[in-house]
Image (cartoon, grey):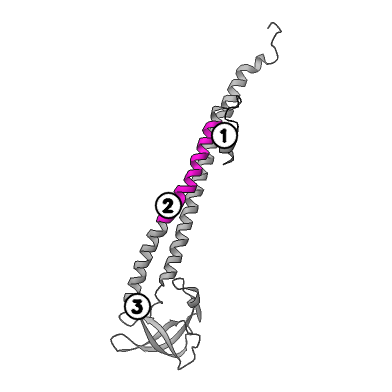
Amino acid sequence: MRAVTGVWRWRHNPLRRATDRREAWVALVALLLMVLAAPALGWVCAAQTDDALQRSVRAQRAGRHATTAVVERLSPSAPRHVADPEISSEHASQTSVVAHWKAPDGTERRGTALTASRRTGPGTRVEIWTDSEGRPVPRPMGAATARAHAVLAGIGAMLLAAGLVECIRLLIVRHMMKGRYTRIDRDWAEAGPDWGRTGTGS
């Protein structure tokens, strides 16, 4: 941005070099890409991710069933509290318990399951989630949680695109500066031997 405004202010200055003008154009294009293209890419990424996650949410809700289980004891072979990244923050704390419950077909099942209930004493009735065969599964992802993940993915894509544009701009400017210094060295090599000899008759 400074390169664009700087060149614009002294665009009629006779000391302005052609590389300054090209550098300003590169900066302007990079700015437009970061302001317009990067947010657009982030929005597209967020929309696509949200669409995919919402389909996953619907599939999970169709294939998972909430049921009531009776706690026998806390599970000794698994951590008592685990974090489930697929659920919202208010249900993030899950407790592993040994319990028995009924599968969707009515058969009795027993095993280790996760519950978000804070009361997990023996004999306590808690809510767990099972698949169509009655096996314990994690709680289905919520629509709001899926949308939050999609927003974060969009923001990440936007920042990544902006960072990539800036890196490309820096590489182009570095290449321009290298060429500029090369031309200065060449011109100095040609003019250097005669420097300060004007009017000496040499």
The residue at which mark 3 appears reads as 64
Q: Residue furthest bottom?
A: 123
Q: Position of residue 110 (x, y in %)?
A: 37, 88
Q: Which dot marks residue 8?
A: 1
Distance from Cα at disc 2 to Cα at disc 1: 29 Å
Amino acid type, residue under disc 1 in the picture: Trp
Tell me what residue is drawn at x 39 percent, y 85 percent.
Answer: 111
The residue at which mark 2 appears reads as 41
Q: Is residue 160 above or below residue 26?
A: below
Q: Main secondary structure of the magenta part?
A: helix
Q: Residue furthest top?
A: 201
Report if the CB atoms under discs 1 and 3 are less than 8 Å apart: no
Q: Quadrant of the N terminus?
A: top right
Residue 27 inside the magenta-drawn segment: yes
Which circle's residue, 1 or 3, is located before the other in the chain?
Answer: 1
In the image, the segment drawn in magenta is 20-44
Report if the CB atoms under discs 2 and 3 are less than 8 Å apart: no
Distance from Cα at disc 2 to Cα at disc 3: 34 Å
Tell me what residue is drawn at x 44 percent, y 69 percent.
Answer: 145
Amino acid type, residue under disc 3 in the picture: Arg
